[in-house]
Image: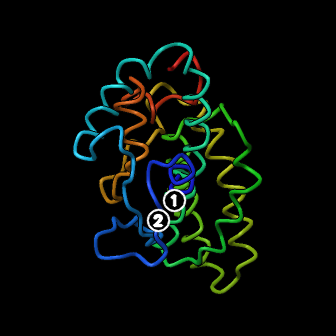
Amino acid sequence: MLSLLDALGIIRLDPQAQADSQMAIGEKLGWAYTWPQVPFGDLEDRLTQYLRTEGQAPAYAQTWLRVWQELLPQEVTAYLQHQLRLHQFADAFLAELVPLLVPHESRFSLGHWRYACWASVRSMASVSLQYPGNAQILKFTLGKELARRLDLAQGSLEGKLCFSPSYSLPDCAMTSVFSTIATPLGDKYWICPPSLDAL
C-alpha cells in the first residue's frame, strides 16, 4: 500500500525515517505526506466522505468484492496464528491452511473460519496431551479438523458456529474501514461469505 501511494506521488517513502516522518506500523517504514492537492489534516475527512458516497456506487462492487476476498485469508491466518500461540503451538502449523484457503473462496464466512480455527486448535491441544511431541499427528489433526469444522459450520443454522469479532485481538484498520465506511456491510462482514449480493 505504501509503495502504491509513493508511486502515485501522495507520499514519499523515506528509508532513513527522519524525525518528522510518519511510521507504518509493523514494517517501521518512514514516510512523508507530499500531495499538494489536499492538506494532510483534511485528507481523512475527504476520503471518508468519498468512500461513503461515490465509493459505494454499483460500479465499485466488483472491486469491493475483490478487496473482501483478499482480506478474508489474511484475517483467517491472523486468527489461526493467534489461536496457535495461545496454545503454545508453533507458527509452522499455519501451513495447514494453504490447501483450504482457495483464492476467491466464497462458501464460508469469516465467522465460520474463526469457529473452525478455534475448534481445530482445541482438538490439537487435546491430541497433544495424548501424543506429546508428535508434530505429524498434530498437523494431520489440524488439517482434518479445519475441513470438518468448516463443513459443520456451513451446514449449521443461521448464526450458529459463527464467531463474531474477537475483543482479545486488536482491530484491523483495513477491515474496519472496509466494513463500516467503504461498504455498508457492518456485521455481514463476519456473518456472510464474500458475495456481490451481500455488498
Question: Residue at 69% of width from left, 64% of height from top?
Answer: 141
Return the residue at label 2: 82
Image coords of residue 157 (percent x, y): 50, 26
Q: Mark 2 falls on what kind of element?
A: helix
Badge 1 amino acid: Ala
Q: Identify the residue at the far front of this view.
A: 36
Q: Which numbered tag is attached to residue 78? A: 1
64 or 188, nearer to the observer: 64
Label annotation for residue 93: none
Residue 26 image position (x, y, % from top left): 44, 68
Question: Which type of secondary structure does the marked residue at label 1 adopt?
Answer: helix
Q: Are marks 2 and 1 in contact (CB under 8 Å)?
A: yes
The residue at the far bottom in this view is 133
Give the alpha-carbon distance from disc 2 to disc 1, as whole Å.
Answer: 6 Å
Residue at x 43% of width, y 46% of height: 174
Above or below, comparing residue 160 to residue 168 in the picture: above
> Looking at the image, is 67 positioned above or below residue 2?
above
Q: Report x, y in % for residue 131.
A: 66, 81
Query: Which residue type does callout 2 highlight?
Result: His
Residue positioned 66% across, 62% down in the render: 142
Q: Position of residue 122 (x, y in %)?
A: 52, 63
Taking the spot 61% from the left edge, 37% from the top edge, the residue there is 69
Compared with 199, 16 (above or below) is below
